[in-house]
Amino acid sequence: DVRIIGIANSKRLWLDYGGVELNAWSADFDRLARPYVLTELLRELPNAPYDELVILDLTDAKPIAQLYPSLFANGLHIISANKRAGSAHESLYHEIRTIQHEYKREWLYNTTVGAGLPLNYAINDLRAQGDEIRSISGIFSGTMSWLFENFSADTAFSDLVAEAKERGYTEPDPREDLSCQDLVRKLLILAREIGLKLDWQDIEVNSLVPEHLRDISVAEFMQRRSELDEPMNEMLESAAKDGKVPRLLASFSVSEERRVKAKVGIEYIPAGDMLANLIPGENIFVIYTDWYSEMPLVISGPGAGKQVTAGGVQSDLNQLLGRLSAIS
């Protein structure tokens, strides 16, 4: 018997231990939600009349990620679409994992990389079979895939950024995508998933956001986004001279000595290459392992959008229920 017993945003909470009705949840939330403090809620939730409690973290909030140790310590399992915990600096990440294991809680986060694609499941399955992953590269951002596949000499890059934000493809602040910070988070999550030690300072990053646009408000950035167009057009023209197109790629590789090399940035790809001809919004992950050494394992599909992300969260929930049923 699985029930949703609460829905919360950053300021208000609708909590009903009998279960909330989802048919008209938005209107009911407006009517029934009350102000709350998350740290106080954590002390209250263990009184809920249920054997197991799960929080679905569908935010992009760093303060929520910082509370993961407290969530685990208060008996909650976590399903996360929030990349902030899995990509936290090493000290916080270590604390999260330590507390998770101490309290024997589950943490599933497949949607943090690749939205609904079964990437983490495939990686874990390979490792469980005894394979060793040597490199993962590709286009990890559905947002950036959509932007670059639609970008041409006839279309202003800044207009595409505005459209992507309106469609819900970008992070709340599009600079998270354009500065490659979102991709860095994904690289960190993937590398840590296979047991590698990697932190922010270890990744070579080339941002698409000019210095003068980095420290202003989101609203001002969107007003001044046309200042992106000149450098982006120069990049497009430079690539075209050699019959290539610019694409934002991410990669890491592991040497035999377990040294990790990781980078994120623009690369010029031949116009006929697979990486240059994705469906807008498509992610592609090219995985080389000991077994897949001559021909890589390739996982591709939609990497952005609310529906595929929601489907990925539902898949994580089904996985969690299977694990809990096996334990009980």
Image: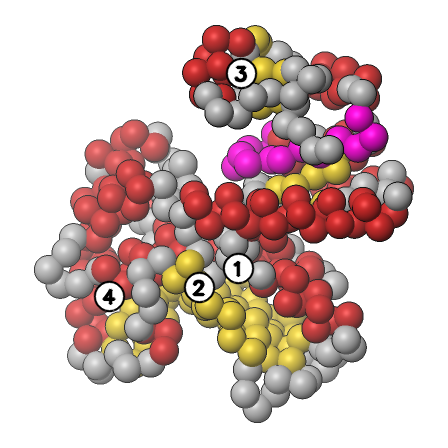
Q: Which mark is in front, 2 or 3?
A: 2
Q: Please state which of the two labelled residues, at mark 2 or mark 4, is closer to the viewer.
A: 2
Mark 1 packing: few (<14 Cα in 10 Å), some, or many (20+)? many
- Depth check: give the residue in front, 3 or 238: 3
Residue 299 in view of the camera: yes
Disc 2 is placed on an element classified as strand
Give the residue at mark 1. Answer: 117
- Indicate the amino acid at tag 2: Gly
Distance of label 2 from label 3 (alpha carbons): 35 Å
Mark 1–mark 4 CB contact (< 8 Å): no
Question: Horizontally, is 192 left or right of 162 in the view?
Answer: right
Q: Is residue 113 above or below residue 168?
A: below
Q: Which amino acid does label 3 sit on?
A: Lys
Q: Mark 4 points at which residue?
A: 235
Residue at 58% from the left image edge and 61% from the top image edge = 118
Left or right of residue 239: residue 130: right
- 1 or 4: tag closer to the N-terminus: 1
Q: Which residue in the structure is indicated by mark 3?
A: 11
View extreme (bottom): residue? 294
Quadrant in which the N terminus is drawn: top right
* Residue 58 among magenta residues: yes
Q: In which quarter of the image is the C terminus?
A: top right
The residue lying at 22 percent from left, 34 percent from top is 223
> Distance of mark 1 from mark 4, alpha carbons?
30 Å
Cβ atoms under marks 2 and 1 closer than 8 Å: yes
- Which mark sits nearer the N-terminus, 2 or 4? 4
The reply to whether callout 4 and callout 3 are in contact (CB within 8 Å) is no
The circle drawn on residue 301 is 2
Give the magenta-colored segment's residue range. 50-63
